[in-house]
Amino acid sequence: MKAVIMAAGKSTRTYPLTLTRPKALLPVCNKSILEHQLDALPDCIDEVVLVVGYRGDMIRERFGDAFGGRRLHYVEQKQQRGTGHAVLVCEDAIDGPFIVMNGDDLFAAEDLARLAQADQAALAKRAEDPRLYGIYETDAEGRVIRLVEKPSEVFSNLANIGVYKFNPDVFEVLRRTPLSERGEIEITSAVQTLAETGEFRVVEAAGYWLPIGYPWHLLDANAYLLDHHFRPEVLGEIHPAAHCTGPVAVGRGTVIRAGAVIEGPVCIGDDCRIGPNCWIRPHSTIGHRCIVSQASEIKNSILMNGACAPHQNYVGDSILGEKVNLGCGTVTANFRHDGRTHGSVIQGVLIDSGRTKLGAVFGDHVHTGINTSIYPGRKLWPHTFTRPGEIVDRDIIGEE
């Protein structure tokens, strides 16, 4: 059986991180979203069709022609005209039943295995507030009656999570599907057509579903996987005067110097320099070739490859892109005096993150001057910089 992973979109909601990479390559626990997805596929999947578009060359270079014993076949979606269109461009590569999944989110392997055993079906997950997603209405046998995208009326708590099992006849259904209000061909419209035949079902997901819609969702996913699916292994060197508690992974070539305090769960990649005299707190992931040193504190954050917090930095509930360098004394604020949740401006709209703790999001190659102070929820575009003593109270926007 084959699987189709849709990874062609630009994902402007996750700027500035996706200005320099496709969303599928964003890291969680030092593995890209796409790698997590490939690892979660059931054994019956022997070939994966990757639908690429925006910066698709980066995906090809990272994964090549095979991964985990499976063949990889690339199809380019030159124009992003909807999820249904992404499936249509794969038609020549499909010769039997197949799984389709969004390239944005993380799914539990056991749920994908159950879906693979179904006929035509979709994974759905019970959600407290499913209004942000499509909602399924089903009969007593699990057959889909209707699927409504972002409805005003909540008639069910079964959310559509973007994973489907189709037969090849879905291609003809998609060709006949009318365009959406956005002028796109949507999978959900085809699902409604299939539901009207009475032969499309829901498989209820029992495991995790970790949607990545905004940058801070990476922090949620990172914390969840560290808590529930983390196998720590120490392959580097830990000084006797360093102090590690809880599950801590240390990559090859990494050196933990004297005075470093690491409280797991923490994942540290290869060839890092940690310490002396720093503090890495729970739910932090440090990428490869990173530096965290004298008097710096990292809390519930993600540092991508080559990021440096070398001296007297506080990085809380934040994401540092590749090769970010923080000047001495750079601090990310992450808490409001009134204890309310933080907002962040996304595409000109202030979005409530739902988090009472949220720091900053740094694009790749950002450099800060000494004693830079950054307000919660602010974002710095790739290759931007701050001057010594600067207070960052709004996003720093660079070139796209």
Image (cartoon, grey):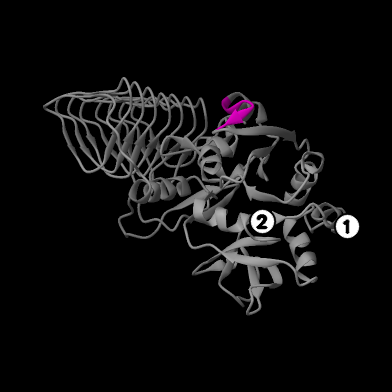
Bin the neighbour count of mark 1 within 10 Å (Cα to Cα): few under 14, some 14-19, many 20 and up: few
Reading the image, the residue beneath label 1 is 176
x and y percent of residue 388 in the render?
35, 25
In terms of image quadrants, where is residue 172?
A: bottom right
Q: Nearer the viewer, mark 2 or mark 1?
A: 2
Q: Is residue 390 visible?
A: yes
Mark 2 or 1, nearer chain start: 2
Q: Is residue 108 visible?
A: no
Q: Amino acid at mark 1?
A: Arg
Please provide the residue range marked out in magenta: 62-67
Q: Report helix, strand or loop for mark 1.
A: helix
Q: Report helix, strand or loop for mark 2.
A: strand
Q: Nearer the viewer, residue 167 or 216?
A: 167
State the residue at coordinates (81%, 43%).
91
x and y percent of residue 57 in the render?
66, 26
Reading the image, the residue beneath label 2 is 164
